[in-house]
Image (cartoon, rainbow, N blue to C red):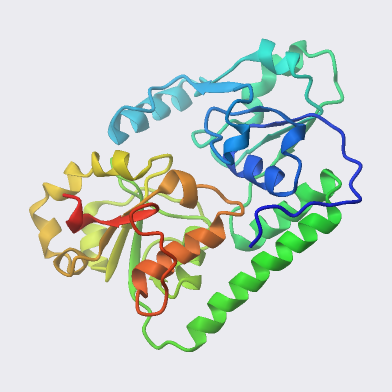
Amino acid sequence: MKSEYISKKSNFTGNIVSLLACTTEIICTLGLKDNIVGISHECDNPIEILDLPRISKPYININESSKNIDSSIVKSVINDLSIYNIDNNLLKSVQPDYIFIQDMCNGCAISANDLKIFFNEVANKNVQIISYSPNNLSEILHEIKSLGNILDCLDGVSRLITDMKIRLKIFKEENFKRNYFPTVAFIEWIEPIYFGGNWIPELIEYAGGKSVFGKVGEHSSIINFQEILNSDPDCILIAPCGFNISKTLSELTPFLNRPEWEYLKAVRNNNVFIMDGNKFFNRPGISIISSIEIIAEIIHPENFIYEFENTAWVRLKDNK
């Protein structure tokens, strides 16, 4: 896939505030990074946008343990408090025409509720709020296309979607050739334990595996450790939402201290892997292709070498 899919006939001139890391990546891929006037605290790609005004920051301490982060989010939800602080004065000053948010998960990213104060005060009532909230691969492709249409990037987004579909077709064709589909447990949070939901089971399937938890399009939910023991997967992938590899490695004590951990097949066979959840698996956008490649490289190393090792994933046994 190319880094940019520019629509030469586009007449788009609006100001964009992207409060999702995945929509920031998509918009830049469509050649409109110069139209972005504000981003969220989470936006980190491409490097050309890193100096843009940051419209948001979390109220909770994202450097705490997964257990404490979860506790803070639950308390905020119970008390009907926002998890994110919006700099409304800064948001007004950049004069957005479009603001991209999500409505899938209050804890994952900024939602419409977080912008209530802004819309109570803003003078330009014509600001358009665009909710980007896909739950599976087909919805991801559909919403990327819709985003491109809204921003008058018709030919660019068409070529982007075509390239993504070609890559997905290649993965499917590879699966027709194989007769071994390892079982995969994808862990999206550590304390409490959440399995990967929504698009994650599909990514595993395209990569040539079989997800032991979750159904396509359904949100992730809490499981207990006994359920991991009962499924005894061939491979365990750990990629907590919002965590990079080093943060995840520092959080693994609840797993490693369990005596039953060593009895799992994946642990005995050194098939436990830590992945960069923040950059790849938590973003329902163009990074899903790389996400499939990462999983394929891990579970079918005899067929795939994408050179993501040590940048997007590491083997746990090598990093204890």
Give the residue at x 65% y 63%.
138
Q: Quadrant of residue 62?
A: top left
Residue 80 percent location from the top left of the image: 51, 22
Q: Is residue 192 visible?
A: no
Residue 39 percent location from the top left of the image: 63, 29
Q: Is residue 128 visible?
A: yes
Q: Quadrant of residue 180?
A: bottom left
Q: Quadrant of residue 210?
A: bottom left
Residue 264 percent location from the top left of the image: 17, 65
**Above or below 61: residue 316:** below
**Residue with the most extreme left position:** 259
Residue 216 percent location from the top left of the image: 52, 63
**Above or below 253: residue 82:** above
Q: How many marks?
A: 0
Q: Is residue 283 left or right of residue 98?
A: left
Q: Is residue 270 left or right of residue 181?
A: left
Give the residue at x 60% y 61%.
137
Give the residue at x 38% y 22%.
61
For the N terminus, give its image quadrant. bottom right
Q: Nearer the viewer, residue 306 or 151?
A: 306
